[in-house]
Structures are given as C-alpha cells and as structure tokens.
Amino acid sequence: MKHLLTIFTLLLLCACGGGDANQKASRMLSDARFALKYGHYSEARDSILSLRQKYPTAIEVRRQAILLLDSVEMAAAADSLKNAQGEEWERLHIKQQFFERKLLEDKKKDAE
C-alpha cells in the first residue's frame, strides 16, 4: 500500500508539472525554428536534441521537433549541395531526397 501511494504521488507530480514542461519545450522548439530560419543548422539540431532529452513528457512538442529535425537535415544537405561536386554532391543529393520523402510521409501520417 505504501508503494502504491508513492507511485500515485509521483504520477500526480509528473502530471501537474506537464504544462511547464510543454511551455519550456515549446520555447526550445521556437529557438530551433529561429536557428533554422537563419541557417544555423548545428544550433537548431542541438536545440532539438536537447529538448527531446530534457522534456520526455512533452509529447506533442517532441513530435513537432522530430519533423523540424528532418527539415533541418534537409536544409543542411541542400545548402551543402551548393558547394559540392562529384561523389560528395551525389551523397548530399540522396540525403536531401531521403529527408524530403521522410518529411512527406510523416506529414501524411500526421494528417490521418
């Protein structure tokens, strides 16, 4: 009984703190979007990965972060394509196409 009460108390604390976690995670997601907008791909990527680690209960924000991470990877590959040649260009082009397809599939699943 004592263990059950402890588990219930922990669950209650997690549930009450969820709103704050969502707000903080949303701010981190906004920071990542801002970084992406200005071509700071490493900063955007780091912000997303940190968000996912710090706020495991912010499910909706984490879902959006995964889509944004795909966009970061796609934009970084497209940006790198501008200066690439030969095999490097082919590799980056394939990477860009992969993330374009993945992003479309994720959006389709989201719409369902």
Image (spheres, rainbow, N blue to C red):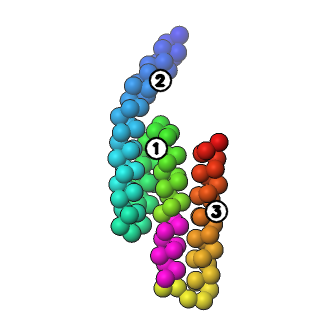
Q: Which quadrant holds residue 39?
A: bottom left
The secondary structure type at the circle numbered 2 is helix
Q: In the picture, which quadrant includes the C terminus?
A: top right
**Which of pointers 2 and 1 indicates the residue nearer the eye?**
1
**Distance of label 2 from label 3 (alpha carbons):** 38 Å
- Left or right, 106 with respect to 50, comes to right
The residue pinned by badge 1 equals 61
Tag 3: amino acid: Arg
Rendered residue at 40%/50% (across/down): 29
Q: Which of 65 and 103 is in front in this view?
A: 103
Tag 1: amino acid: Val
Q: Is residue 56 visible?
A: no
Residue 110 at what x, y percent from top left?
60, 45
- The mark that comes first in sequence, 2 or 3, is 2
Rendered residue at 52%/46% (across/down): 63
The secondary structure type at the circle numbered 3 is helix
Q: Nearer the viewer, residue 27 or 110?
A: 110
Residue 97 at what x, y percent from top left?
62, 69
The residue pinned by badge 3 equals 101
Residue closest to the far top? 1
Q: Can residue 33 be seen in this view?
A: yes
Range of residues picked out in magenta: 73-82
**Distance of label 2 from label 1 (alpha carbons):** 20 Å
